[in-house]
Amino acid sequence: MTHKTGTDINEISINTDVLVIGGGLTGVKSACEIASSGYKVILAEKSPELGLKNFEDQDIQDLIKKTASDSNIDVFTNTNIVSSAGVSGDYSVWLLKKDEIFEKKVGSIVIATDSSIKVLDKEYGLSLSDKVLSQSQIESILASDKEKIKGKSIAVIAGFAQEGNPIVTQRVLNSVLAMENISGSTVFVYMNNIKVASSGLERLCKEGRDKGAIFFKLTDTPEIIESDEKIKITFIDPVLRKKLEVEHDLIVIEEQITLDPINKNLANLLRIDLGPQDFLQKENVHMLPVRTNREGIFVAGSSRKVCNLTNAWVDVDNVVLELKNFLADGTKKIPGDKAVIDAEKCTICLTCYRCCPHGAIYWEGDKAVISPIACQGCGICASECPMNAIQLGGYNDSFISDEIKAKTESKTAKPNIIAFCCENSAYEAGLMAESFKMEMPEGLNIIKVPCAGKIDLDFIMSSFAQGADGVLVMTCHNGNCKSEKGNIFAGWRVAEAQRKLEVIGLDKERLAFVTLASNMGKDFCRVVNEMEERIKKSG
Amino acid sequence: MNIELKKKVMVVGGGIAGLTAAWELSRMNIDVHIVEKTCFLGGHAIKLCCKATEECQQCGACSVEKMMKNVVNESGINIHLSTEIENINRNGNFKVSLNKGPEYIDSRLCTNCGACFEKCPEHGAIIQGFSKNNTPLYGIMEEKISLIKDFCKDICPEGAISLDKKGSSENLDVDAVIIATGFQPFDPEIEGTYGYNKFDNVISGMDLEESLRQNGCALKPSDGEKPEKVAFIQCVGSRDERLGNLWCSQVCCPYALRMAEVIKNKNPETEIFMFYMDIQNTGNSFPVFYEKCKSDMEFIRNIPIDIIPVENNRVKIRYLNDNDGSPLIEEFDLVVLSIGITPGEDSNKLSKIFDIALDEDGFISNGNKFNNSSTSSRGIFLAGTAGGPKNIADSMANAGQAVCEALNYLGGEEPIQ
């Protein structure tokens, strides 16, 4: 990486090669689209082959062929990621193929791991047999051997062993419809919540019913008894309000979409946050659609949510868009608002490395360095550094101290309230309250910070020392912080400051921690007025 | 990078999909024109409230605010408010004739002081936007102009209001078009037996969004007090064969559950009943969230047929007991009709102007089985709910896709001789 220092903007050149992890359909499509945008791609797939077996769509087959022959795509099959280092724009990744480990340098990483499926027969107390079929099995029978189910009574069961999702529903409904088209067969569908929240599924449901499929929508799992000849299902019919028993020749069991088990390992290797159910994206609207907590690492398709090909293609396009913005032509202009470590003061205690939510801090020799590309300017490290060795470009400590001083001095209205507001949420809410002419305390002073993570204990205490009657620390809601945990750090510091206030005999209620969103003007107004009331009451 | 003239793209619609598309295009150095028919940017999504309890519930409403701020501060995006597309002529690129409504409030003079809005004697003649990023924050309704002629003469301290302004025509040459014209919320009056607009305390999901956004809590319209017992009726206007609305609107379960949680969080004493057919998922943490909802409210798998008024502005709802089918009656002091997404009111007109196909439900149909942003016409792309129900996150992602496809199209286009 080379640095060219300008007046306030640095120009940095970065590697524009991209590593795509996962050679399933999302990975293949990503590789193709990224390569055609002019970037070199390394595509790593753990299995021996690209694509998805038995997926016969011609367009898809063409895509896989194109990927394999594209000179801008280096395909590595049977390959796993074993280690990584570096930061955004300059990642080193070590790949393992057979017994050989080799290093690749890339500027960006796209994770496109696939999902697989698990049959839920055991969850229904059954085992697959010639009478108990999985969703996949019925699909292949319908594709090749329809005669097998002619004249049969078939039960289809879904939504009891799992909540399910529209992808599961679509597969179920498609095969219900196909079975109804086979003469003499009758289909009974036992379902809990039918997940129809996807284009065309309600219509598919109706088509199935029109063709003669009988739907029983139940909230409790029906009793399923397998005998030598038949499958007997017993349940309370919600329409007739009566116990019913139906005998079937076959039962089709739903399948669960499961994530690639390597997700956990990848998250660990690449230092990205795991989301619910081990998806590779934390639930946080700032990450949407395809970002992770680390700049330059993106997630697409099943690696971040349950999805079909159409959804995955949306992700691929968004990844391409992000890459065009991030990599551009390999030169990046970096504004001067990033965090910088003073090497003289740094004692290499690792605090910054551990608390940086964006994995932006690395080691060069025996020095900690903050990558200006990866840094998102939240300031958590600057506030946490025990040596006070880190300053944030746009919001250094003396700038904020001056603000506190200026604001407490300039306003004579009492009580004097200092509100430290995260610029992504509470600050915007404050502007909204102002725009909509909501009445707020005269002595309110708003101090904008890039993230609540930059609100030092010192700022809070010195506000009181400068004469503030009350202090508010106003941040994003839990799960909505752009830097994931800036608000959590702020919460801890407020609790600490409250303890200190008590020690020096000040009412700790004069300091409050509040979470708000950018569109909560009314709540902003309520909070600041409540603080004013509280101060007035306590005198 | 090409040194040739910057490419120009028109984005039709200034809701969340249009805003996202415009922003992403401008980041790619494209000259963008947003054409919005109302006097405010933001569409329906800007009216939505934050649904956080102690935790963010991932509804995405704050993303709309953020995107709007991006767009209004970006000089490369030209915004045409109160503007409709008259016609379009395709000759290599697109020659668009715009019909611009009169700019009664001069945006260069208006300081958003609000004097006109606060003092307006005629309710609804001067309206207020939903976001501080709306400039001007106020709009004048053309059909009510005659009623406020005198009032407007010298109400504005800046002299920004002039009711004599006429509309104008403007021509625009663009290289590609993104259609992001959005949806129309289902009109709950169509379901007459629910008494929307007849009974004070029967409101729509959109009304509740606005109440939460503007008051910070749910209030009964009849007396402005907090409700003690609330019913949500799901699937109003969606999944309804009788109405021919054979689709799930996808957003109503998430918004109803999230707002119910907000009400419960602000006032844990509130009793909440959720009348539903099938509960749809909210996101990756749905299994955990759903369990929380189940412990906080009553779920009744039954869509009531009618709502009957009783004294004190309360209403009663009849439904069948889940266990034995016996009829039950429950009284509520607030009923929320979870209205869904229906095709935009201009779908037919747009389909003619742009020569693009509609699907059987009346949404703009996508031209490719795997690509949600393509239309049946080259150079015209689709973003957001114009193509069918989507939540905020999906509308934004779809807009990103439309931009990516539009860039591919612009990059690969042969120069027209």
Image: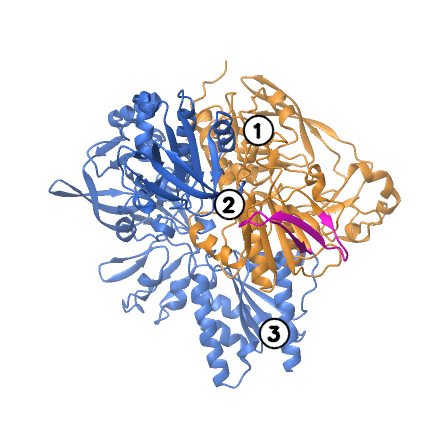
* CA gap, disc 3 and disc 1: 59 Å
Residue type indicated by callout 3: Glu
Pick whichever, A376 or B291, lies toward us.
B291
Q: Colour of chain B?
A: orange
Same subunit: marks 2 and 3: no
Helix, strand, or loop for circle 3? helix
Q: In this view, does B381 lie to the left or right of A538?
A: left
Q: Please state the horizontal and vertical placement of residue A65, each as a whole percent of the image.
A: 27, 24
State left or right for residue A200 relative to residue A272. Answer: right
- Residue B320 falls within the magenta-colored stretch: yes
Q: Residues within 10 Å of mark 3 (few under 14, many from 20)?
A: few
Span highlighted in magenta in the image: B308-333
Q: Quadrant of residue B68?
A: top right
Residue A532 in the image, given as x and y percentages of width and height: 64, 73
Q: Distance between the residues labelled 2 and 3?
A: 56 Å
Determine whether the residue tagged by mark 1 lies in a helix, strand or loop. Answer: loop
Q: Can residue B181 be seen in this view?
A: yes
- What residue does disc 2 label? B279
Name the mark nearer the viewer: 1 or 2: 2
Badge 2 amino acid:
Ile
Give the labeled residue for mark 3.
A409
Chain under callout 3: A
The residue sitting at 45% across, 52% down in the picture is A284
Q: How crowded is mark 1: few (under 14 residues within 10 Å), some or many (20 or more)?
A: many
Residue under the point 74% across and 37% down: B103
How crowded pointer 2 is (Cα within 10 Å; few <14, some 14-19, many 20+) is rated as many
Q: In which quarter of the image is the C terminus of chain A?
A: bottom right
Q: Colour of chain A?
A: blue
Whole-number angstrom distance, CA of label 1 to CA of label 2: 24 Å
